[in-house]
Image (cartoon, rainbow, N blue to C red):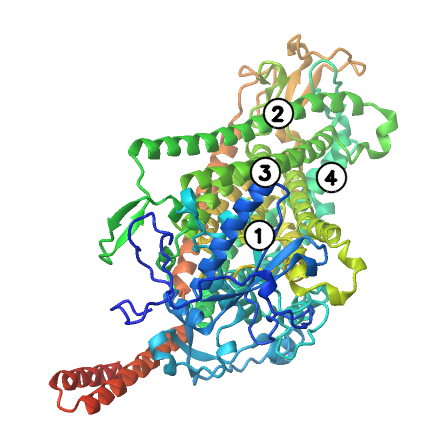
Amino acid sequence: MNRNGRKEEETLIEMSETGDGEDLNGPLYEINSNAGSEIPSHSEIDKQPQSKDSVFFRDGVRRIDFVLSYVDDPNKEVDRKKSERRREFEMNLQKSGLELEVEDKKDSESGKIYFVKIHATWEVLSTYAEVLNIKMPIKENDLDQNKENPLNWFLRIFKLPYEVMNPEADYFTAPFSKQRQELFIIKDQNKFFSPAIRNRIVYYILSRCPYGIGEEKRKFGIKRLISNGTYTSAFPLHDCQYWKKSQDEKCDNERYTLYKQWAKFGKFYKEQPLDLIRKYYGEKIGIYFAWLGFYTEMLFYAAVVGFFCFLYGWITMDENISSKEICDKDIGGQIIMCPLCDQRCEFWRLNITCQPSQYSHLFDNVATLFFAIFMGIWVTLFLEFWKRRQARLEYEWDLVDFEEEQQQLQLRPEYEAKCTHKKKNPVTQEIEMILKRSPANILGKLFLCWMSIVFWIFLIIASMIAIIVYRLAVYASFASVMENNHTLEPISGLLTPQLATSVTASCLNFIMIMILNLLYERVAIWITDMEVPRTHLEYENRLTMKMFLFQFVNYYSSCFYVAFFKGKFAGFPADYTYMFGRWRNEECDPAGCLIELTTQLTIVMAGKQIWGNIQEALVPYVKNWWRSRRARNSPESLYSRWEQDYDLQVFGQLGLFYEYLEMVVQFGFITLFVASFPLAPLLALLNNILEIRVDSWKLTTQFRRAFAAKAHSIGVWQEILNGMAVLSVVTNAFIVAFTSDMIPRLVYYYAYSNNEASPMSGYINSSLSVFAVSDFKSISMPLENEMNVTLCRYRDYRYPPDHEKNYLHTMQFWHILAAKMAFIIIMEHVVFVVKFFVAWLIPDIPSDVKARIKREKYLTQKILHEYELCRLREKLSEKGHCSEVAKQVQATEGKVQLSCLM
């Protein structure tokens, strides 16, 4: 659309106010008087023979860009109102230039569903392409695209066929202009706009087309019509069946290609056809799969390093002096530990924790520190290299000049429907409709919104406290049952009371997480809808922050508890601390709490990934199987393309939101707590390889074709990832310092060891304090003492009972605490310095992309100026002596010369 002046003929839609708010035309909508005003009745439709697998109207020429469906309502009064809305809505669609064709319910497989097929004409497409500022090709790209790679011979096995990876020729592009059509490379008007662009334009019209009658005059949009039951669905068609090509020669069969080359798990090692994904589904879905693929590639390097760190722990497990002392009958077998719970628990020997202490060494060793530092740098490299990859995609997908501000033109229909006041835009100086809100209304909604969020966060904390209470109560039961129980001797070495409690509590916590997620999701959507955000971008950003804040607390709270709170406030035998004055706080295993954090992380992370894949793959498959069970008994010739797509699941506007949320939560697991589990990146890598194929499979086979939408980045998720990257440095430093035993071992090695031949000998004895049984309080005194124990040991650094400072912390405790704090400060500063240096060193935009952008801008500007120059010369030759036109010619020539100098 030319915004510099009005054309003589009325365009199909003008982005301006139409007059008073009570006109039939809703906001941002204006009828073209030249379009037809009546919808043909079903009896008037020409019943021409047609293939049921066709994506064209009955004439075989006009492409079906969108499909609406509806059914008769059994209530005649309700059905009459719905029919009136449909009649008004479809009449306005025709007035806007769209063409409709109706399939009677008698022709549907079920005999109950009407289908309204919609075709966008060239006039509509060209008008809205200008309104939406869509870039189209003007000149073939003359820059050298081929780069020699010495590894091409090896990478060939990961490549897809050239025609799959490059479905379209590479062009220089410019925003489409209806008045300058001859500038653009239009070989065929029917194929000039891709199906993704066509359905994006049609959906833009559908979401703003009015249908109000009488009191409903300000109501508009297909979304509201679907919510009130006037229509049952609205969707663009897939171009063919996914398992075979269409018989229509005019069909591109892109869905079939995507299924064969992308959605099959056998192609897991192949690159993704991102350009074809973008062409078929639009840039928003394309950018998600580009990010997911890049994230998976980067996980490979983290997984390899993590695996070697784990392998180091496995190889050195038999050389670990600490676990050897615990397992030694003459050392660990002679150390009597204090009871694990009050009264019911008995004294026990340290060597029964032999196997857990050995397995703890797999994750609690010197490689843990190296891996924690490595992951702090890895996450920076991932984010910085993604910015470069994103910049390249922006150029290749014509998104360089696409800014989020352009989406401000695309207001949410729900917002527009509530606009009742007019205001002059200070930038455009045009009158536009706004939603007027009183301060009391704003504060009231804000208060309700944040109080709801705080309430749900407190609910998570309450559930977490319930899990902790469960751990405390069951821990005592496990300890009393498993100690000195001969029936459990075969597994007693592996399954300690601490581990049994941790596993069962982790499983219960995972179930609680899933339940709370299901409930809060609906609450978050309800709160965001109530806020009435202005644009789709604002809506997604607000919902993202609410959901992520909740998910952060929900998923990570249990891991934070085990990492930073468990065993830190247990007290000592003479003065145990109790939760609510009843349940004694948990203690860590003598080998440390890190193995329990690993268990918690593994169960929650793996459980979430398994459950997520079941939800994404199995649930849609079962639903589609159930919905299409009748059609399976019908001949294929009677099951039309629109009916096949109607039976598929709906990929809503928030479909990608849940995909991003799933991956970002996973990103938190592999960065925030990775020091406790070096294999976490490997698990994430295996999951993501499966995730890419599951997501592609469900999009291609189980879901209706998604509405095409533009996006030049992953949006607010980028900021969330940046925040988590910074937080991960802090959490991993604290895990290494306070959860693992690395710092206490290093302090003992350098400051307290007296054995030069074996410096770590005696560490276990040094880390256990002595307690006199006679000093137990009555509430803690064991009911039985079959071994006649007078002294027992507990994990702490306190003076013995016969010392003048009995049960006070020793100097070794303060040395270890000082070393921990110093380590945290040093590690954080070192990693942060390296992170920020790496971020500064790596430019966000590759130099060759910058050069290509400048080249394209220069050529586009030159072509446009030369075009204007030719038009002005033609005008000059027509009008003869016209000094004003001559001045315009000189000015335009000057612009061309200036662009050449640039």
| Residue at position x 60%, y 26% in the image | 796
- Mark number for residue 42? none
Regarding mark 4 in the picture, which secondary structure is present there?
A: helix
Q: Amino acid at mark 1?
A: Glu
Q: Position of residue 356 (x, y in %)?
A: 73, 37
Disc 1 target residue: 659
- Where is residue 527 shown, x and y percent of the image? 46, 37
The part of the image, by quadrant, that contains residue 354 is top right
Marking on residue 466: 2
Contact (Cβ within 8 Å) of mark 2 with mark 1:
no
**Mark toward the start of the polypeptide (1 vs 3):** 3
**Which residue has dot 4 on it?**
324
Disc 4 to disc 3, C-alpha distance: 44 Å
Residue designated by label 3: 517
Determine the secondary structure under disc 2.
helix
Q: Is residue 308 something that shows in the picture?
A: no
Q: Nearer the viewer, residue 457 or 383?
A: 457
Instruction: Pick whichever of labels 3 and 2 is earlier in the sequence.
Output: 2
Mark-to-mark CA distance, 4 and 2: 37 Å
Q: Residue at x 65, y 48 (%)?
A: 612
Q: Position of residue 716 (x, y in %)?
A: 44, 51
